[in-house]
Image (cartoon, grey):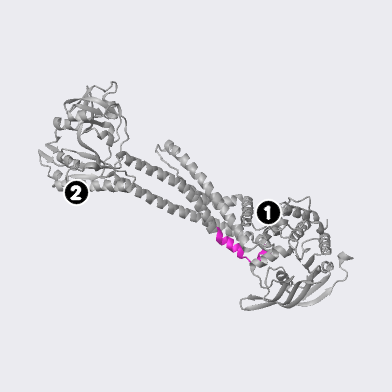
Amino acid sequence: MAAIVEVQDLIKNYYMGDVTVNVLKGLDLAFDEGDFVSLMGPSGSGKSTLMNILGCLDRPTEGNYYLRDRDVAQMSDNQLSEVRSTYLGFIFQAYNLLPQYTVVENIELPLVYQGVPLDSRTKDRCIALAEMVGLGTRLDHRPLQLSGGQQQRVAIARALVNDPQVILADEPTGNLDSRTSVEIMEMLTELNKAGKTIIMVTHENDIAEWSRRVVRLRDGMVESDVRNEHPLGFR
Amino acid sequence: MDIRDIPPVPPLAAATGFEGLHKLRRSFVLAVRSLWLHKLRAFLSVLGIIIGTSAVIALMAFGKGSMQDALEDIKRQGATNIVVRSVKPPDEGATASRSFVASYGLKTLDLTRMGTFGDSISKMVPMRVFPAEVRYLDRMSNGRLVATTEDYAAVNKLVPMSGRFLNEEDNFRKLNHCVLGAGLADKLFPFEDPMGNSVVIRTQEYRVVGILADRMPTGGTGGSQAAEDYNNDVYIPFETAKVRIGATVVIRSSGSRGGEKVEVSQVTLTVDADFETSEGREKVRAVGNAIKGMLKDNHLREDWAVSVPLDRLEEAERAQARFTSLLVLIASISLFVGGIGIMNIMLATVTERTREIGIRRALGAKQRDIIVQFLVEAVVQTTVGGLAGLLFGVILVFGLPPLSQFFFDTNLPAQLSWQPMALSVGVSIVVGVVFGLYPAWRAAKLDPIEALRHD
């Protein structure tokens, strides 16, 4: 299996006046295509910073980042925007749907910025995705009319609409109760079974149980990197 | 349903050059929607633009209307006319000795000299004005006795209501014919038809051959041109006045008797030129200067004055230009203030929607997309504001004159023209772009990570 995400000697410094904060201290990681990875670690360990860099929202101070052979470490803001809209899917803790848009309009948003024409084929795909996540009857609802679990499912559909190479989930169950969390994790597992690469940040051990590989960070370094031979969804 | 059964992402459209247009249309729809979400706020923020635009359109229309009125007035006087008048020199008045006859002013000889100007003067109308009592039976009215020739009617745009104006024959044969102004005719003949009747002027009888239609008095400007009210005039042939009345007017006042000897009170010359063209105006001015030179050469004293209504026309036009530029200034100020209002609201909007911006950026929006989004929102606001102002301004233009007529009994002329309308709406759009640009730029420059974390 070829690595779809690979970072080499990744360093990220933040400059606050005269003080330099060294957040990532030379990470080397490679994630295979079709993998389901949990990033864990206490706050301040650098997992959010790593996630931002993997999500092409931020650039490393030093080091390389290859997203399937594309060297994205030193791309311009415009190029990074294109990478995000074309190759990445985002799932956030706070769902981050646009409140003034309907379910379908939220789902199609990444395609808008990719420049896909909004014709009937696009619409069919968005509706099919909404049906897949179980919101086929709520296509014209606004986010505020939906429960947290439903909103997160819209967000999952939105993350899938551009057929991304990697799905980045930042504490996807952080705002949900345990029963809904299980639903969401089952859904992510289904996607992973269908071949989607998923990188997920979490600090709950029972959520990490669902993934195939658990990477723990501490102080900007990899503390442990363990394969989970029996993820919850595969038992 | 399995992810593998979902229809694929449609391919990017082949480059047609219209993708930008398509995106812009979408931004437009979204902008309208997000403004609709905050109707009151959007309305308040464009209120400045609405007021500015409507004020400009209304003021322009009223300004243009009243200016047009003034210009019409001057044209009524005859824009290519030159008026030469006899003026009593100040030193003569000061002497004021008893039984003194002051002799001054234009002479018949001057008329002959002006006649030599040839083709450039198409009409020459001499006038001798006397104060006069006009009587019919027991009725009497004070009016102005004007001795003049046939062309006077044409030059002063007088139209006979019945009968005719004086003609060449009246003048040549020194006939005792007269023409009455409308007001005078009404006073002297409230019951009878004046036509064919005789009125008594200065102890002599004149037969009425015509009555003039009512005519609006001309507006005067201080000193150079007196206002003239033609409705109380009585007209007799110029040559008749020469032989029957002569040049001298005797003024009796307590303890003294003065007299004035004036051969011609006023000559109105019409220059054969088109005042709409600069050559025509040049010609009028040249003739005026030539007459001044001629009078200077032949008169010892400055007992004459030449006035050119064209100067007033040009003065009025200059006033209009000044007025217009003043309005443009006011318009710019009000639209600038309106623009600041827009900028203020847009900055607040950007802060309020920081998270939305972060989400959009995370999902792949480029900085350019964010700029376009907010810029379109600002421009939609100001455009709608400009159009609303246009509508309101037009309502003012049509609504105010009847109100002012009703409440203040003043005539408020208005003339709408498309230039200020197009200009103010155009400027509104530009204001949207200019004042929307900075907030949009701020929005685009937000750090996506920071923006996503924003509450």
Q: Mark 2 points at which residue?
A: B293
The crowd level at tag 2 (other Cα within 10 Å; few <14, some 14-19, many 20+) is few
Q: What residue type is labelled 2?
A: Gly
Q: What stretch is highlighted in magenta?
A: B436-455
Main secondary structure of the magenta stretch: helix
Seen at 21% across and 39% down, the residue is B266
Q: Name the residue under label 1.
A: A100
Q: What residue type is labelled 1?
A: Gln
Q: What element carries label 1?
A: loop
Query: x, y percentage for residue B172?
Result: 18, 30
Q: Nearer the viewer, residue B377 or A31?
A: A31
Seen at 65% across and 78% down, the residue is A20
Q: Chain under label 2?
A: B
Q: Chain under label 1?
A: A
* Above or below B59: residue B163: above
Query: x, y percentage for residue B48?
Result: 51, 52
Within the magenta stretch, is there residue A208? no
Q: Is mark 2 on a helix, strand or loop?
A: helix
The image quadrant where one finds the C terminus of chain B is: bottom right
Mark yes or no: residue B52 visible: no
Seen at 41% across and 38% down, the residue is B408
The image quadrant where one finds the N terminus of chain B is: bottom right
Residue B14, quarter of picture: bottom right
Q: Determine whether, in the image, residue A145 is placed left or right of residue B16.
A: right
